[in-house]
Amino acid sequence: MSLSSQPPAAALVFQTLLTQGPLTRAELGRRTGLSSGAVTKVSTPLLADGWITEMGQPAGERQPGRPATLVAVRPERARFIGVKVTADELIGVAADLTATPLATRRTPLGSRDVGTVVRAIARLVARLADGGGGPAVHSVGVTISGDVDGHTGVVRYSPFLDWRGVRLADLVERATGVPTVIDNDVRALTVAEQWFGSGAGLSSFALVTVGAGIGCGISVGGRLVSGAHGVSGEIGHLPVGGALGSAQVCTCGNTGCVEAIASTQAIVDQAREETGDPGLTLAEAVRLAHSGDEAARAVFTRAGRALGLAIASVANLIGPERIIISGEGVASYDLFADQIRRSFTAQAFGTAAECDLVVRPLPFEAWARGGAAVAAQRLFAPAGAGPQSAS
Amino acid sequence: MSLSSQPPAAALVFQTLLTQGPLTRAELGRRTGLSSGAVTKVSTPLLADGWITEMGQPAGERQPGRPATLVAVRPERARFIGVKVTADELIGVAADLTATPLATRRTPLGSRDVGTVVRAIARLVARLADGGGGPAVHSVGVTISGDVDGHTGVVRYSPFLDWRGVRLADLVERATGVPTVIDNDVRALTVAEQWFGSGAGLSSFALVTVGAGIGCGISVGGRLVSGAHGVSGEIGHLPVGGALGSAQVCTCGNTGCVEAIASTQAIVDQAREETGDPGLTLAEAVRLAHSGDEAARAVFTRAGRALGLAIASVANLIGPERIIISGEGVASYDLFADQIRRSFTAQAFGTAAECDLVVRPLPFEAWARGGAAVAAQRLFAPAGAGPQSAS
């Protein structure tokens, strides 16, 4: 955190407008701590280059004398493409500077072979780049689950694709001709929430994703917690399951992990065991539970309790202002919502229980939007600094 | 994190010298990102006021031409007093700017009544302030376990003292006539480690204290994680015990908490149960375990496993560069060291296992030093910003 890594005044002004604008120059000065001279100095080239624009006076404040113009970011000034890679398809989105989606496309993956996936990404990017006119694509952000090094652009390990040490950013950049960044998919979603979603303006928050995996992005003081050794937010591997009498073995080899109880596959496995039907699907397990089947309900109840204990662990250790629960899994959230809240409240220590729990569905396109947010962030916050708090 | 809360140039120069000095002006400029003109401008008043000093040329670099003088902080420029309040005694230390102890005193507490404790603190501060000459005492830092709000100076809840809503900073300030800050004891220890100990220069670290309670301080990006609702680092209330077949009820009312298995009292309780000796003391339990008694050994083994799982949870969620294990409890660390490492390694996810585990004994005086470090920090880093990373 040297001074040179602090956002310079121009980035600070731009970030403040991006997350809190439109603002008058005076308010911009107040929120950034910059003098009015400094605000004018850094605004001029941003205006000239079309990154920000003047919008007239704020409503209800028209007074005689010199009008106070509002300054705002021009979201249409740059375009980004976000791509989420899953085990069997690509989801792509073209988005503006504020990561607002302009167009979405999905494409199935015939193979998990690196070359095939890279070529498919390049075709998807080309199609998304073609549509709708607008400015040229500034950069591409590709996200993927697993251990991804955003700094070097290397996928160190992706269990779903069975990739190790893949220089994905370089490969996609060569195939598309567009600057490319990559990141872990949950971290990218957290970046999108931090700048443009439920995390904006908060001192700290966590985003828990429930689905094929159980992931977690953590933001403290406007910065993503990224882990000194590359690992962070592995809420799926907190050993809380023993408290629930679970002896399910996790993919990581341990017993008691949240993921071994509450991931999609774990729920299907347990429901098959409980109902004695080895061919049961997730949809059928959900239907059974909704229809009141005790065995199926018990599986979702246990998953909810494991998630509640894990979320309480995050609150007890980090004390975030808000925890957002999301992911494909929340589609059947009604089946375990009560248990999540109940075991969270019981286990949260003292005032940690005051943490705001928010549940949000997560359309698959939102994952791709995370990639666009990561790409955009490299432009306006090159040092990876988070948004300035409004308070 | 507004710009105005960033350390101004003078604080930045001072912090850099404090943690990385002595340095030449050129090196100081390089590490702070300031121009040589700016370094000179902010150094001049610091030199004039005796906060920093010039020390001659660096060894082995004497060259013809203009000599490169080293600049260093003068630790003796200011004195601080740190006081740790426990249930039955006060431990006080007088320390210099770098939190190096100059004198130590302990005093028993006859009562936990607020007035009695405040008067005892005032007497202890007066005695420590008298000794040794040197500059007047700049400020006092009082630390205490429990939920302490360092910003408002209020002890919200201290279970050991049975205090609620005590405006301790104001009371001590009035009784001593010296500006006073207060903080949670584990957080204060973490501040001392961050600036002057095993955490200096690290991107992130955690300090786990094992003793009457199981606490944890977490530092990410040079800042202490303090929790949006006042709670953070409550590693003692992670529900990992179920995995170990433990049904011990914690002071918080839950079962499976680390503290219900590994705190001093929990170890004594379990050892009494296992050995059938209701009068067994901790010292006797340690002696029994050392002599090979299976029942006593099993209690320490289970404590070690619970601590290992809890430490792995910190690593999986936050991924710190290093985790320091300390506290009175590590005096019998040989009895559970293996189990801590083994269950940490098994539960740590992927590269999170590369986290550096360090065990350090913690003399009781070190707790008081934490108070001195918190007091000193308010002087040189008023916004609570952490040390600049050297890298």
Image (cartoon, coloured by chain):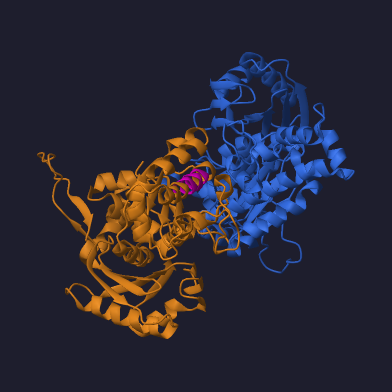
Chain colours: A orange, B blue
Image height check: is B272 above or below A41?
A: above
Left or right of A180, for residue B278: right
Quadrant of the snapshot with the C terminus of chain B: bottom right
- Residue at the spot 17% in from the left edge and 73% down from the top edge: A132
> B295 or A109, which lies in front?
B295
* Residue A8 visible in the displayed image: no
Residue A63 appears at what percent x and percent y?
11, 39
Left or right of A218, for residue B116: right
> A145 or B383, which lies in front?
A145
* Residue A266 visible in the displayed image: yes
> B37 or A50, which lies in front?
A50
Q: Main secondary structure of the magenta part?
A: helix
- Is B276 inside the magenta-drawn segment? no
Image height check: is A212 above or below B267?
A: below
Residue A311 appears at what percent x and percent y?
47, 46
In the image, the segment drawn in magenta is A304-313
Q: How many marks?
A: 0
- Residue at the spot 36% in from the left edge and 63% down from the top edge: A377
Left or right of B74, for residue A170: left
> B253 or B16, which lies in front?
B253
Image height check: is B140 above or below B207?
A: above
Quadrant of res A275: bottom left
Residue B224 appears at what percent x and percent y?
55, 45
Residue at far front of view: A276
- Residue at the spot 44% in from the left edge and 78% down from the top edge: A168
Residue B97 appears at what percent x and percent y?
67, 40
